[in-house]
Amino acid sequence: MDLKVSEEEVDRLYQKLNNAAEKTGYHLNPDSELTRELVRGLLVNKQRYGYMACPCRLASGDRTEDRDIICPCDYRDADLEEYGTCYCALYVSREVVEGKKEARSIPERRPPKEEREHHTTPSPAIPPRDLPLPVWRCRVCGYLCARDEPPGECPICGAKKERFERFM
């Protein structure tokens, strides 16, 4: 299969991702050459699999199995919070954009396939106190997320981490 992506397609997706990122408190890597190659990889994966799997990870071709690595991946926020960049470095923290921190390679956060196969998503019938992760609520806009810590910035309104409260 011959997969080709035009510069116009890369430009369109780059702009779309950049606009969405900036509106929601995220930032694309300021290294435009690297970022354009990552965007190209997303487009190739969309042609190959039908979805934009992370260009730096090996996708299986099974959307259900790969749902955690469909961009933006499930690991982006934790990676940004801890390292200032996501695994592939498409998204970076404000500190990286401002030159206060350098984007560098980071360890893979995605569990091995065997562990992912045994992980189940809790049923909506499970009372909130039994959820495997705490739920955080943005006090500004009401955005909810389930994770160990609240995000550095709310992806909806851009409120800082301090504006989150533990929900329920």
Image (cartoon, grey):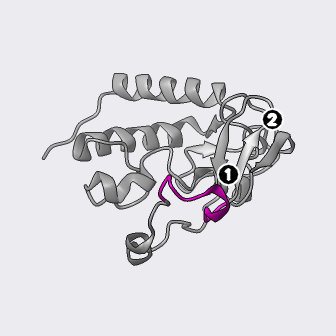
Q: Is residue 99 left or right of residue 61?
A: right
Q: Which residues are magenta?
A: 123-133
Check the image and report above or below for 50 versus 125: above
Give the foreground label among 2 and 1. 2
Along the viewing direction, whichever of 73 and 145 lies nearer the viewer: 145
Say what secondary structure mark 1 lies in: helix
In this rendering, does residue 30 appear at all?
no
In this rendering, does residue 18 appear at all?
yes
Q: Dot 1, crowdedness within 10 Å: few (<14), some or many (≥20)?
A: many
What residue does disc 1 label? Answer: 80
Type of residue at label 1? Leu
Q: Is residue 35 left or right of residue 5?
A: right
What residue does disc 2 label? Answer: 139
Q: Residue at x 26, y 56 (%)?
A: 62
Q: Dot 2, crowdedness within 10 Å: few (<14), some or many (≥20)?
A: some
Q: Position of residue 3 (x, y in %)?
A: 21, 41
